[in-house]
Amino acid sequence: TIELEENVNADVQSLVDQTTDEKFASLIYSEQGTSYLLLNATGTTEARLEEKDGNLHIHITETDDSSPDVIEDVVYKFELEKKYDMIHLYLNGQEIAFEVWYG
């Protein structure tokens, strides 16, 4: 499962603080343990995980809010129990690029 994380530890927060005020996605990846998905989003987000053919697919749905010019930091936390061949990230059904940091 993947869940919104309101209170991140200092290491994760330092990475969030380094981001610019533009839309982006980054993954702090741990093969076994807690991983984090960092987003700069202009709306409300929901996330879900899907395993398929040895790959992990992370689906983000972003709904526009009344203030589309305001970019918010969003952090999702999830646990991985195995190594995946590939990780794919989708925003509103479209695959997007993302940065990966290994934790």
Image (cartoon, rainbow, N blue to C red):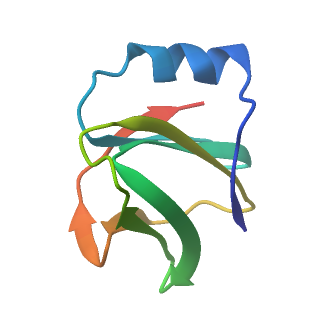
Q: Judge whether 81 appears above or below 92 on screen.
A: above
Residue 28 visible: no
Q: Judge whether 4 appears above or below 71 on screen.
A: below
Q: Residue at x 71, y 28 (%)?
A: 8
- Left or right of 92? Residue 84 is right
The quarter of the picture where residue 14 lies is top right
Q: Nearer the viewer, residue 97 or 19?
A: 19
- Left or right of 82? Residue 86 is left
The quarter of the picture where residue 93 lies is bottom left
- Residue 25 in picture, x, y percent from top left: 35, 44
Q: Residue at x 40, y 14 (%)?
A: 18
The quarter of the picture where residue 6 lies is top right
Give the quadrant of the N terminus: bottom right
Q: Residue at x 50, y 85 (%)?
A: 52
Q: Which residue lies furthest to the bottom in this view?
A: 53
Residue 18 visible: yes
Give the quadrant of the C terminus: top right
Count of marks, rendered view: 0
Q: Nearer the viewer, residue 87 or 68?
A: 68
- Residue 58 in picture, x, y percent from top left: 47, 67
Q: Nearer the viewer, residue 88 or 69?
A: 69
- Residue 30 in picture, x, y percent from top left: 63, 42
Q: Judge whether 30 appears above or below 60 on screen.
A: above
- Residue 90 in picture, x, y percent from top left: 34, 68
- Left or right of 60? Residue 8 is right
